[in-house]
């Protein structure tokens, strides 16, 4: 009798294991900013992840998402990441948004625990050479380094200004972008009169910082911060200093800023951001996003978050058809296999096609909504940079810069 019970138990366990292998899912966390200075961006960027996961589920591969809020700050971000890794046991995380959160999360949580971290929005150049990831290969991003955006911002500003000052959020993001801008602007004979940091925590007024930044009467003030900061200090600049000549960036490409400051005060003002090259991939994504959430807002990095989830899911499916456990390491080892050439092109939403090709042992090359997700040896991608402007109560693309010179 005991032998029969043991045999039956083994049989039930074996059937459950086989069934589980067929219906495998992975757990993926998100680290977004739902509160704090980047709260305007968090929900929209998270929608990109949700859309990719839903489409993969419809194609036959389930992804369980667990969402956490970083509060746009390092300590809450680290605590949220620990919960995702230690309690939820995720294999990968999409996030964070701020470089000042992503880098400490990577160094203290994800890299030591061997969990994939793909940021859709963190642009600090130091991520490329983060010592903690050397030889580990667990840190990636689907947005370009500010080694690209900063160069174009400096070039743009130098094309119609001789002097500039920079007001920037005092974290890894703001510092990195400000330094790259300064080097690029001054290489082109511009002169930076002041580099003025402000605290990550939102303040009621920024008149002291503006007084320093505007003391030399710069031709242009660079607003290298987040929406919740900038909508306060831009209003201060206009009301208390009668100053309206700004240069914006990805962090200040914001509908909230336009509402707070007034469209007339921003009319024609330019900024930079990572660009999607457009084409079929973006058209497909935009249509799918609209069907799920409504019109795609003109905010940064929604496409990049979709691409991050897409390559995680595709790499996990590649591991599945290879017959290996869906661990973070096995998925990580296949990220470049599904995202980089060679292989048949896979556009956004074409997951059923991708899964079929992988099952047949074919190579695929995912082309993202935000651009080609061709990870280099450092987990970086290279995309064009968009020059955009506030115009007629909305945000419009001026042009796309594909040729990005070196400093």
Image: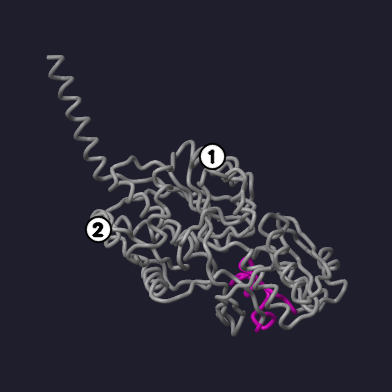
Relative depth, front residue between 155 and 31: 155
Residue at position x 15%, y 14% in the image:
2
C-alpha span from label 1 to label 2: 35 Å
Q: In the rendered view of the protein, which quadrant contains the N terminus?
A: top left
Residue 238 placement, left or right of 152: right
Assign the C terminus to one quadrant of the image: bottom right
Range of magenta residues: 245-268
Q: Residue at x 49, y 65 (%)?
A: 302
- In this rendering, the answer to whether 267 lies above or below 173 is below
Taking the spot 17% from the left edge, 28% from the top edge, the residue there is 11
Q: Is residue 49 rendered magenta in the image?
A: no
Q: Position of residue 254 (x, y in %)?
A: 60, 70
* 137 displayed left or right of 333: right
- Which badge, 1 or 2, is on the more N-terminal residue? 1
Q: Which residue is mark 1?
A: 82
Instruction: Read off the residue under disc 2.
Output: 356
Kindly check if marks 1 and 2 are in contact, taking CB atoms under 8 A apart as contact: no
Quadrant for residue 368, please give it: bottom left
The picture places residue 230, in percent across and down from the top left corner, at 69, 67
**Residue most extreme to the top:** 2
What crowding class fits label 1: few (fewer than 14 Cα within 10 Å), some (14-19), or many (20 or more)?
some
Element class at badge 2: helix
Q: Is residue 318 left or right of residue 142?
A: left
Q: Is residue 257 magenta?
A: yes
Q: Secondary structure at mark 1?
A: helix
Question: What residue appears at the point 22 percent right and 40 percent down from the top-left corner?
Answer: 19
């Amino acid at each position: 009798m005991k032998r029969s019970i043991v045999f039956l138990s083994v049989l039930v366990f074996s059937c459950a294991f086989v069934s589980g292998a067929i219906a495998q899912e992975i757990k993926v966390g998100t680290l977004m900013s739902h509160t704090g200075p980047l709260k305007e961006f968090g929900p929209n960027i998270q929608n990109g992840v949700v859309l990719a996961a839903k489409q993969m589920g419809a194609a036959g591969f389930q992804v369980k998402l667990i969402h956490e809020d970083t509060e746009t700050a390092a300590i809450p971000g680290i605590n949220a990441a620990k919960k995702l890794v230690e309690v939820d046991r995720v294999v990968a995380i999409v996030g964070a948004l701020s470089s000042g959160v992503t880098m400490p999360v990577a160094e203290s949580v994800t890299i030591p625990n061997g969990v994939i971290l793909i940021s859709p929005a963190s642009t600090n150049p130091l991520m490329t050479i983060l010592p903690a990831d050397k030889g580990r290969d667990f840190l990636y991003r689907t947005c370009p380094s500010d080694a690209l955006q900063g160069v174009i911002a400096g070039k743009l500003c130098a094309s119609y200004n001789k002097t500039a000052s920079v007001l920037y959020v005092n974290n890894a993001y703001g510092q990195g972008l400000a330094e790259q801008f300064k080097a690029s602007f001054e290489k082109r004979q511009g002169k930076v009169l002041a580099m003025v940091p402000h605290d990550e925590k939102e303040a009621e007024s920024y008149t002291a910082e503006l007084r320093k930044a505007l003391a030399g009467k710069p031709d242009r003030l660079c607003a290298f911060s987040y929406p919740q900061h900038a909508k306060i200090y831009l209003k201060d600049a206009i009301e208390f200093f009668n100053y309206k000549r700004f240069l914006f960036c990805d962090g200040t490409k914001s509908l909230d800023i336009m509402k707070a400051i007034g469209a007339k005060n921003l009319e024609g003002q330019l900024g930079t951001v990572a660009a999607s090259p457009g084409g079929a991939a973006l058209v497909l994504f935009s249509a799918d996003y609209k069907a799920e959430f409504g019109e795609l807002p003109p905010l940064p990095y929604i496409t990049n978050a979709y691409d991050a989830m897409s390559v995680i899911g595709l790499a996990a499916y590649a591991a599945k058809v290879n017959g290996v456990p869906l661990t973070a390491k096995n998925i990580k080892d296949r990220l470049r296999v599904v995202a980089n050439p060679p292989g048949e092109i896979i556009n956004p939403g074409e997951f059923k096609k991708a899964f079929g090709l992988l099952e047949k042992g074919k190579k695929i090359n995912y082309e993202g909504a935000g651009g080609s997700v061709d990870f280099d040896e450092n987990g970086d991608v290279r995309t064009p940079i968009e020059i955009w402007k506030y115009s007629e109560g909305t945000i419009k693309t001026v042009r796309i810069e594909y040729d990005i010179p070196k400093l």
